[in-house]
Image (spheres, rainbow, N blue to C red):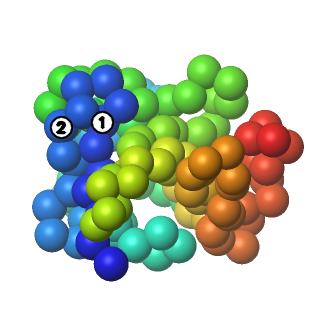
């Protein structure tokens, strides 16, 4: 199934092939590109090795096109993008910005579908 991931602010596409592209910023201010798998529940990432990303680190996520910060206002550890599927149905996708925390949520028609073995971490914030 092919889906387009888009920025909630500028509504431009964020994915290339099977990856969603973000600018990430570390706590000390270092920035770089991060590619995440576009498959929900697949937590593989690719980044330039000059930007050392460590397990447990909290990153800021930005749209690479409009530079908007993609964090949600109601939880400091979640990032939000939009997903449009093959039938042109739009959903929200939220995921943890903590490196290595496997928590992703597909929100469609008021229903939350969790992905990842740590997905229970933020369910209360989404209900």
> Vertically, is 36 above or below 122?
below
Specify whether 4 is left or right of 16. Answer: right
> Vertically, is 121 above or below 126?
below
Disc with the residue nearer the chain's start (2 vs 1): 1
- Which residue does the image show at 21% across and 56% down from the upper left? 15
Q: Secondary structure at mark 1?
A: loop
Specify whether 33 is left or right of 8. Answer: left
- Which residue does the image show at 27% across and 72% down from the upper left? 2
Residue wearing tag 1? 7
Where is residue 116 shown, x and y percent of the image? 64, 71
- Which residue does the image show at 34% across and 69% down from the upper left? 37
Residue 126 image-quadrant placement: top right
Residue wearing tag 2? 12
- Give the quadrant of the C terminus: top right
Q: Residue furthest front?
A: 87
Specify whether 117 is left or right of 72. Answer: right
């Amino acid at each position: 199934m092919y889906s387009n991931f888009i920025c909630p602010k500028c509504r431009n596409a964020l994915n290339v092939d099977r990856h969603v592209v973000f600018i990430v910023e570390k706590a000390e201010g270092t920035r770089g590109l991060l590619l995440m798998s576009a498959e929900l529940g697949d937590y593989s990432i690719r980044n330039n090795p000059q930007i050392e990303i460590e397990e447990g680190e909290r990153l800021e996520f930005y749209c690479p096109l409009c530079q908007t910060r993609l964090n949600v206002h109601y939880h400091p550890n979640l990032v939000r993008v939009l997903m449009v599927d093959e039938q042109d149905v739009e959903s929200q996708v939220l995921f943890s910005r903590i490196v290595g925390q496997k928590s992703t949520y597909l929100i469609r028609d008021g229903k939350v579908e969790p992905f990842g073995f740590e997905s229970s971490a933020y369910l209360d914030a989404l209900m």
